[in-house]
C-alpha cells in the first residue's frame, strides 16, 4: 500500500498560509485543511473563502476535512472550488450517500470520517460510495492532542473491511500523528496520515514529512 502524508495547516501560521503550504510542497502528497464551525466541534477555523483563496496559490492537492454541521449543504462547494478530496463526518451528514455522490460528481475524492466512539460497522454499506475512510485518532476539534491507541483495533477492522471490498479505499488517520505513533497506525493498516504539530512545529517541515513517510513505510512493510 502506498503511504501518503497530508500535513495539516491547522498547526501552521495562519498569517502565512501560502508560504506554509509551499514549505511542504516538494514532499507532501496532500495539504490537509481542517474546516471547523464551532458547532459540530468546539473550535472555529476557516471556511470556503479561505480555501478558494489558497487554491489559487498552492501546488499541493487540497484535502478538505469538514468538521461542520450540515455538510450535506456545504461539501459539494468545496469540491466545486477545486479541492482534490472532501471528507464529511458520518455523525453530521443526514444524507451521506447523496452528499458523497455530489462530491464525486464535482471531480473530487469523497471521504467519510468517523469519530473515535463511532462504530465502523454501522457504515460498512457506504464503502462503495467513498474513496477514503478517515479514522479520527483524537476527538475532533483541536490540534496537538495525544494519539488514542484505543482506535487501533478499529483501524485494523477498517483495513480488513476495505480489503474484503476490493481494497481501493484509502484509510486515513488524523490526530496525534508523530514519528512514534505513525508506526502503530501504519502497522494497523492506515495508509494516509494527517500530521499537524509534528510537521509545522518542526524546524524543517519538509524533513518532518520525509521522516514520517519513512517511519510509516517501515512499519507497513
Image (cartoon, grey):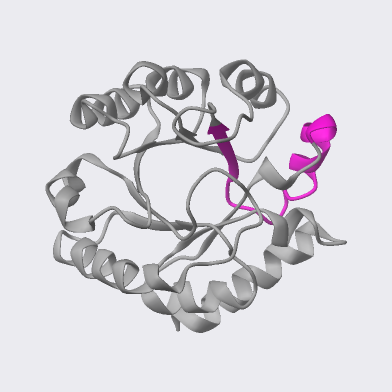
Q: How many marks?
A: 0
Q: Which residue is drawn at 64% across and 69% down?
A: 178
Q: Which residue is drawn at 51% across and 18% down?
A: 81
Q: Which quadrant holds residue 51?
A: top right
Q: Residue at x 48, y 23 (%)?
A: 78
Q: Which residue is drawn at 58% across and 63% down?
A: 176
Which is more toward the observer, 66 or 62?
66
Which is more toward the observer, 119 or 169?
119
Up-down relation of residue 105 to residue 58 (above or below): above
Residue 9 point in image, percent of width and height: 68, 42
Query: Which portion, as a residue range, is magenta?
Result: 14-35
| Residue 133 appears left or right of 15 | left
Up-down relation of residue 96 to residue 185 (above or below): above
Q: Which quadrant holds residue 99?
A: top left
Q: Which corner quadrant holds the N terminus? A: bottom left
Residue 109 point in image, percent of width and height: 38, 37
Residue 168 point in image, percent of width and height: 27, 56
Residue 7 point in image, percent of width and height: 64, 51
| Residue 187 appears left or right of 102 | right
| Residue 58 appears left or right of 72 | right
Seen as rendered, the residue at the extreme left is 125
Q: Which corner quadrant holds the C terminus? A: bottom left
Seen as rendered, the residue at the extreme right is 203
Which is more toward the observer, 106 or 173?
173
| Residue 14 appears left or right of 48 | right
Amino acid at each position: 500500500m502506498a503511504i501518503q502524508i497530508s500535513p495539516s495547516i491547522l498547526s501552521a501560521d495562519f498569517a502565512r498560509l501560502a508560504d506554509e503550504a509551499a514549505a511542504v510542497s516538494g514532499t507532501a502528497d496532500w495539504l490537509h485543511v481542517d474546516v471547523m464551525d464551532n458547532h459540530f466541534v468546539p473550535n472555529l477555523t476557516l471556511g470556503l473563502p479561505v480555501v478558494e483563496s489558497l487554491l489559487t496559490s498552492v501546488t499541493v492537492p487540497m484535502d478538505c476535512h469538514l468538521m461542520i454541521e450540515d455538510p450535506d449543504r456545504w461539501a459539494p462547494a468545496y469540491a466545486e472550488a477545486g479541492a482534490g478530496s472532501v471528507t464529511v463526518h458520518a455523525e453530521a451528514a443526514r444524507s451521506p450517500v447523496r452528499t458523497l455522490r455530489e462530491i464525486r460528481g464535482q471531480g473530487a475524492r469523497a471521504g467519510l470520517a468517523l469519530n473515535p466512539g463511532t462504530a465502523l460497522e454501522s457504515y460498512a454499506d457506504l464503502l462503495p460510495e467513498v474513496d477514503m475512510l478517515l479514522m479520527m485518532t483524537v476527538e475532533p476539534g483541536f490540534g496537538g492532542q495525544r494519539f488514542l491507541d484505543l482506535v487501533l483495533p478499529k483501524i485494523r477492522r477498517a483495513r480488513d473491511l476495505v480489503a474484503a471490498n476490493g481494497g481501493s479505499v484509502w484509510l486515513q488517520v488524523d490526530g496525534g500523528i508523530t514519528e512514534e505513533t505513525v508506526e502503530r497506525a501504519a502497522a494497523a493498516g492506515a495508509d494516509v496520515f494527517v500530521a499537524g504539530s509534528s510537521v509545522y512545529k518542526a524546524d524543517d517541515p519538509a524533513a518532518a514529512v520525509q521522516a514520517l513517510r519513512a517511519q510509516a513505510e517501515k512499519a507497513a512493510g
